[in-house]
Image (cartoon, rainbow, N blue to C red):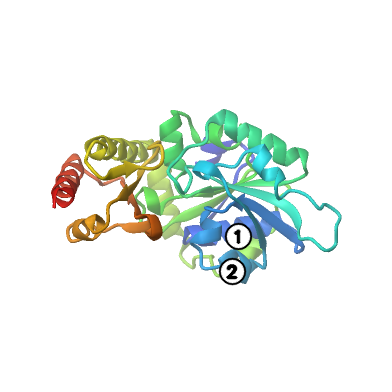
C-alpha cells in the first residue's frame, strides 16, 4: 500500500507515536557524531521533551525560520564546520510539512531544500505528522510531496488525521538502514503490529487520508474567516493548513477556554493556536466564532 503511494523503493515501519517516528528516523539517518539542522520551531526541538537528545544522543542545530520554513540560506547558517572535530557534524536536515506554524512548503520550496541539503551531503527527514494536510493544501499526492521532491525519510502521521494510535516511518532512501533493530531498541515495536497496521491501511488504502485532511483545512479556513474582523483579534500566520494562530487581548483567551480547549503558543504576546481536525464540524466553527465574539465584546 505504501509503495503505491510513495514509490517502489519505499520501506515502511509502523510505530506508536510521532515522537518515536521522528527519533527513529533521525537515528537511522545519522552517524553517532552527527547533528540535525532544523527550524527553532520544529517539533523535535520544542515539543518532544528532549527525546532526540536524550534517547538518540543527537545534537540539534536550530535556526530561526520565519513561518516555520527552512530555506537553503537558512540551512547554511548551521551547515558548516565539516571536518572540524570540535563541532557536531551536520548530517541531516529536518523539515516539517505542514509546519508547526500552520504554513505549507510549496513543491518548489521542498525541492530547493532537498537539492541544497543533498549538495552538502546531508539527508532530508520530513516530520509528516500533518503531511496529509500539506498534500491537501497543495492538491498533490504523497509521492509528489516527498519522493519526487527528494525527501529521504518520512515520519508519516496517522493520529493527527483520525487514527487511534498509529504512525509510520517511510524510508525512501535505500541506503538508510537499521530501523529493524532501532525500532526494537527504542521500544517502538508493537507486539501485535497488525492492530497498528490495520489503522494505517484503513486511512491510506483509499482517499480517506486526503478527504479527512482536506476537511480539517477547510474548517480552519472557515474559522479564520469567521473571526478575522473581530475587534482585538489578530491572525499572525497564513492559514494554509488546519491551524489558526491568533493574538488576543488580555483575558479573552481565558473567557473563551470556558467553552473551548486550546493551547497558548506564545503566552508573552497573547498568541494562541487553534487546530481543526477530521471531525471538526461547521457547527463547531460557528459556535467558537460566536463564543469569541461574546468574549471580545466583554
| Mark 2 Cα shell of 10 Å, populated few (<14), some (14-19), many (≥20) | few
Residue pictured at 43% horizontal, 41% vertical? 132
| Mark 1 secondary-structure assignment | helix
Q: Which residue is mark 1?
A: 24
Q: Is residue 197 left or right of residue 219?
A: right
Q: Which residue is mark 2?
A: 186
Q: Is residue 105 visible?
A: yes
Q: Is residue 185 visible?
A: no
Q: Is residue 279 left or right of residue 208?
A: left
Name above or below for residue 263 compared with residue 110: below
* Label annotation for residue 225: none
| Mark 2 secondary-structure assignment | loop
What percent of the width, then of the height, locates residue 19?
51, 61
All told, the count of numbered labels is 2
What percent of the width, then of the height, locates residue 61?
66, 56
Pointer 2 or 1: first along the chain: 1
What percent of the width, then of the height, locates residue 187?
55, 70
Confirm or deny contact between disc 2 and disc 1 (CB under 8 A): yes
Return the residue nearer the eye: 150 or 117: 117
Residue pictured at 60% horizontal, 64% vertical? 52
Distance, label 2 to label 1, CA atoms, is: 8 Å
Residue pictured at 29% horizontal, 38% vertical? 224
Q: Is residue 196 left or right of residue 82?
A: left
| Mark 1 Cα shell of 10 Å, populated few (<14), some (14-19), many (≥20) | many
Return the residue nearer the eye: 272 or 195: 272
Residue pictured at 38% horizontal, 55% vertical? 269
Q: Quadrant of residue 164?
A: bottom left
Return the residue nearer the eye: 104 or 152: 104
Q: Is residue 144 left or right of residue 206?
A: right
Amino acid at each position: 500500500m505504501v509503495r503505491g503511494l510513495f514509490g517502489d523503493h519505499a520501506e515502511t515501519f509502523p510505530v506508536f507515536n510521532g515522537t518515536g517516528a521522528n527519533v527513529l528516523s533521525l537515528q537511522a539517518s545519522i552517524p553517532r557524531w552527527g547533528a540535525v539542522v532544523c527550524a527553532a520551531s520544529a517539533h523535535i526541538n520544542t515539543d518532544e521533551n528532549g527525546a532526540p537528545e536524550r534517547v538518540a544522543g543527537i545534537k540539534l542545530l536550530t535556526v530561526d525560520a520565519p513561518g516555520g520554513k527552512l530555506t537553503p540560506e537558512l540551512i547554511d547558517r548551521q551547515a558548516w564546520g565539516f571536518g572540524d572535530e570540535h563541532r557536531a557534524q551536520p548530517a541531516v536536515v529536518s523539515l516539517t510539512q505542514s509546519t508547526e506554524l500552520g504554513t505549507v512548503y510549496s513543491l518548489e520550496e521542498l525541492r530547493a531544500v532537498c537539492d541544497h541539503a543533498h549538495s552538502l551531503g546531508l539527508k532530508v527527514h520530513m516530520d509528516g505528522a500533518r503531511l496529509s494536510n500539506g498534500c491537501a493544501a497543495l492538491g498533490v499526492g504523497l509521492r509528489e510531496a516527498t519522493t519526487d521532491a527528494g525527501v529521504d525519510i518520512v515520519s508519516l502521521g496517522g493520529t493527527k488525521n483520525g487514527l487511534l494510535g498509529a504512525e509510520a516511518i517511510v524510508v525512501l532512501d535505500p541506503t538508510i538502514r537499521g530501523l529493524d533493530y532501532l525500532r526494537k531498541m527504542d521500544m517502538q515495536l508493537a507486539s501485535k503490529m497488525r492492530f497498528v497496521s490495520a489503522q494505517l491501511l484503513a486511512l491510506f488504502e483509499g482517499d480517506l487520508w486526503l478527504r479527512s485532511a482536506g476537511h480539517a483545512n477547510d474548517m480552519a479556513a472557515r474559522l479564520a474567516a469567521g473571526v478575522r474582523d473581530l475587534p482585538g483579534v489578530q491572525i499572525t500566520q497564513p492559514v494554509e493548513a488546519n491551524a489558526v494562530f491568533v493574538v488576543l487581548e488580555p483575558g479573552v483567551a481565558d473567557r473563551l477556554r470556558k467553552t473551548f480547549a486550546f493551547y497558548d503558543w506564545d503566552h508573552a504576546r497573547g498568541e494562541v493556536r487553534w487546530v481543526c481536525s477530521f471531525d471538526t464540524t461547521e457547527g463547531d466553527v460557528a459556535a467558537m466564532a460566536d463564543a469569541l465574539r461574546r468574549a471580545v465584546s466583554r
